Each structure stands twice: as structure tokens, then as C-alpha cells.
Image: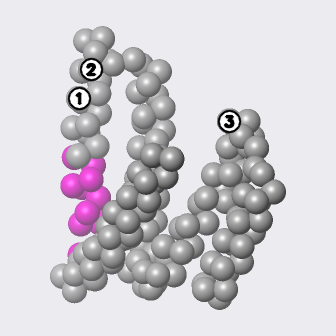
Amino acid sequence: MEWMWLAAAAMVFLALSNVVLKILVGKAGEAKMSMGDVLPMAGIVVLVILGVVAFLVITGKINADLVKWAVVFVAFSTTAFFGVVLALRDGKVSVVTALMGLSTVLVAVLSYFFLGERLSAKEFAAIILAVASVLALAL
């Protein structure tokens, strides 16, 4: 059950970070910052990270297969982050994050097909209730 405490702690910090992100997005709007102002900085960070990863692969300090999956993870996470930032510019943080919470439904479906995980009847019912509650909140 230790994993449950860790997941709960991660949820708390994710909730806090989303509230702070909404504040930052608001401050960026007040400062008339656009995504065009942020993208060059993000590009530099990505290039530095890629340089470090390439060095680690070349020197044999890290497995190339691990890097492949890490790059996919970072690409998906970065895309999701920019989506959240754009959604938070106009949306209420409570609704945006509730809608993001539906990712659990997608994770359940994807893990069924790609990881062979099965849902119990209780888990399936919980997912249906989660979808219904988010739809009720968002619509």
C-alpha cells in the first residue's frame, strides 16, 4: 500500500503545481507574453538536454533503448504541458484539471491493449463514475 501514499502525495503536488501554473499563466498574460516568447527558451532547454543525453549514450553511461522511451515520454509530457498552459489561459483551473483527470480512462484502455492489464468490475464502475462526474462539471 506504500504506492497508494506515494500516488496521493503526487496528486497533492500536481494539484498545487496546477494552481501555481494558472497563476503563472495569468501573470504571463498580464505581461503580454505569448507562446512565441516561451518557445525559444524551451528550445534551448531541449537542446541542452539532448546534448547531455547524447553524451551519455556515446560514453556508454546510459542504454540507448532507455533513451528512446525517455524521448517518447518527454515528447508526450511536453506536448501535454503546453496543452495545459493553453487551456489554463482561458479555462477555470478546476475544470481544466478535472478534464485532464480523464487521462485515467485513457490510461486504463491503453494499458489493457499494450500492457495486458485487466480491469475489475469495481475499477470499471469507478471509471464510468469518473467520466460522468467530469462531464457534469465541464458541461
6 relative to 102, above or below:
above
What's the amino acid at mark 2? Leu
Nearer to the camera, 90 or 109: 109
Residue that sits furthest to the left in the current view:
31
Residue at the disc numbered 3? 115
Among the 4 quarters of the image, the one containing residue 61 = top left
User: In screen coordinates, is 43 left or right of 5?
Assistant: left
Distance Cα–Cα, label 3 vs label 2: 29 Å
Q: Which mark is residue 86?
A: none
Q: SS class of the residue under badge 1? A: helix
Total numbered badges shown on the rendered structure: 3
Name of the residue lying farthest toward the right: 121
Residue 66 rendering spot, x and y as whole percentages: 44, 25
Element under disc 2: helix
Q: Amino acid at mark 3?
A: Leu
Q: Quadrant of the C terminus?
A: bottom right
| Residue 45, image x, y percentages | 23, 46
Give the structural element (helix, strand or loop) at label 3.
helix
Residue 40 covered by magenta stretch: yes
Whichever of labels 3 and 2 marks the residue nearer the N terminus, that label is 2
- Examine the rendered structure and indicate whether residue 7 appears above or below residue 52: below
Within 10 angstroms of label 3, few (less than 14), some, or many (20 or more) residues? few
- Determine the CA span between mark 3 and mark 1: 30 Å
Q: Are marks 1 and 2 in contact (CB under 8 Å)?
A: yes
- What residue does disc 2 label? 56
Which residue is nearer to you in this view: 94 or 41? 94
Note whether 26 is above or below 11 in the view shown.
Answer: below
Name the residue tied to disc 1.
52
Contact flag, marks 3 and 2 (Cβ < 8 Å): no
Highlighted range, magenta = 33-44
Whole-percent x, y for residue 11 in the image = 42, 62
